[in-house]
Image (cartoon, rainbow, N blue to C red):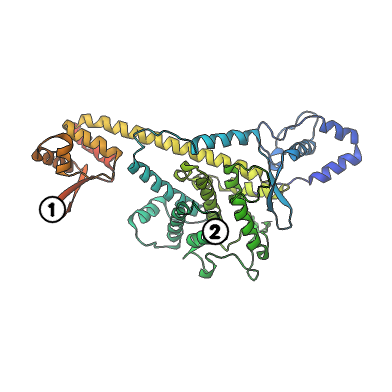
Amino acid sequence: MKTPVSPRPTREILGDLADADQARLIEILGRGVPPTVNGRYRHWDTLRQLTPPEGLSHEEWWLAIKLARRPLRQELPLADRDGNPFGFVITGEALRLLRQVDRDASGQITLSEDVATPEIRRRYLVSSLMEEAITSSQLEGAATSRRVAKDMIRSGRAPATRDEQMILNNYRAMQRVRERLEEPLDPALVLELHRIVSEGTLDDARAAGRLQTPSEERVAIRDERGKVLFSPPPAEQLPDRLERLCAFANGELDDHHYVHPVVRAILLHFWLGHDHPFLDGNGRTARLLFYWSLLRDGYWLIEHVSISRILRGAPSQYARSYLYSEWDDNDATYFVMHQLAVTTRAIEDFNDYLYRKMREVRDTERLLDDLALNHRQIALLSHALRHPDHRYTFRSHATSHGVVYQSARTDLLQLEELGILRRTRRGKTYHFRPVADVRGAIEGAATRQRT
């Protein structure tokens, strides 16, 4: 990642102008420059490349923007290693994105009957948990492919490499997050989540599930040339800082200032990443806290989306949002805006995914017309597309359609012969279940029928 360019401190720019030309300073302040540029919360690193308003230099423009942001800033109980507080600004764009998340992730959304069955939603959930586990680990260096990783999780086989162990750990930690939503956050849970994500992946196994100690070297963030970009707080501060993070997560430090639940979740993500309290696995643990916070506040849809998949597509932007926030007067707005964009994009992708699945179900049902099947078999396969874990027996099929046992037996055996159902035996009873790719099996049978 290219190292961002930082501006001169605002107080220096202000001081130079006040000393040289107070009339000019008054003129700049009277321009009414907004805190954003065309609605975007710009950092100096990008602002310096844009064309300033007529009559202003880049530094004068930056000064006017910074002064416009100052009265809008809400201070946080999070401070840097020297005790300087972080803060954030809620812009118009932030309000728009927050409304979008509120609408799409926490409301009573009516899903199409094609995807609303418990079986299909459970499959989508497992797939989403796997996706987040895989991409969150890949974001921190795991090299295993998605196909191999998903096969490992589904089959239950033991991890063959440290990278696979990292992914399995993250999947288990995501499941643990879902189990702990009724309890407030405390340091023990944060440490437990870190232990789960890092167990069996660290050179020093004793570092799993504990904060770094004063005797250990703190890991600084460096650029490609080795220059230190960020040094985390000293280890002596970590226990108190973790206690404070948990108090903020539970709403105990709001001090009469309302913090939107989505902003709170994003700031927890930022806070743990900034403190970097663990030897490794800080990013994965931070993202788990984001999920925990939103799910606990009723944003039920969030467990179906993967923010790490979006982050992995542009990791430098993710890292830069941290640096912008840490380098510009501890202004966490840069990180908040980045994560709001990521979250809304992940939700939109999930909605697109559901739409594709609905279309697939309906398109597959139309293929049934190409098969020489009776109405009972077509009804069963339509049911199977929406209930892929359902079991059928000769008796249940006969009862459902009011036919004799022999007719039901013929129906199911023909669907087995077509490769759409598979048969198992429990005691004296045969059970028929849709194959893993029932849609593909129907398409294949229809293609063979046409040829």
Compare marks 1 and 2 and give the one earlier in the sequence: 2
Q: Is residue 287 above or below residue 25?
A: below
Residue under the point 30% across and 31% down: 363
Percent of width and height locating residue 344? 53, 38
- Looking at numbered disc 1 in the image, what kind of residue is underneath it? Lys
The residue that mark 1 highlights is: 428
Mark 1 and mark 2 in contact? Answer it, CB < 8 Å.
Answer: no
Label 1 secondary element: loop
The image quarter containing residue 446 is top left
Label 2 secondary element: helix
Q: Is residue 131 left or right of residue 49?
A: left
Instruction: Please name whichever residue, 58 or 388, is drawn nearer the observer in this view of the structure.
Output: 388
Callout 1: few (<14), some (14-19), or many (20+) C-alpha neighbours within 10 Å? few
Percent of width and height locating residue 251? 61, 49
Callout 2: few (<14), some (14-19), or many (20+) C-alpha neighbours within 10 Å? some
The residue that mark 2 highlights is: 190
The image quarter containing residue 54 is top right
- Looking at numbered disc 2 in the image, what kind of residue is underneath it? Val
Q: Is residue 247 left or right of residue 172?
A: right
| One can see residue 36 in this view | yes
In what quadrant of the picture does the C terminus appear? Answer: top left
Instruction: Please name whichever residue, 103 or 199, is drawn nearer the observer in this view of the structure.
Output: 103
Residue under the point 17% across and 39% down: 397
Q: Is residue 112 above or below residue 15?
A: above
Label 1 and label 2: CA atoms lie apart by 50 Å
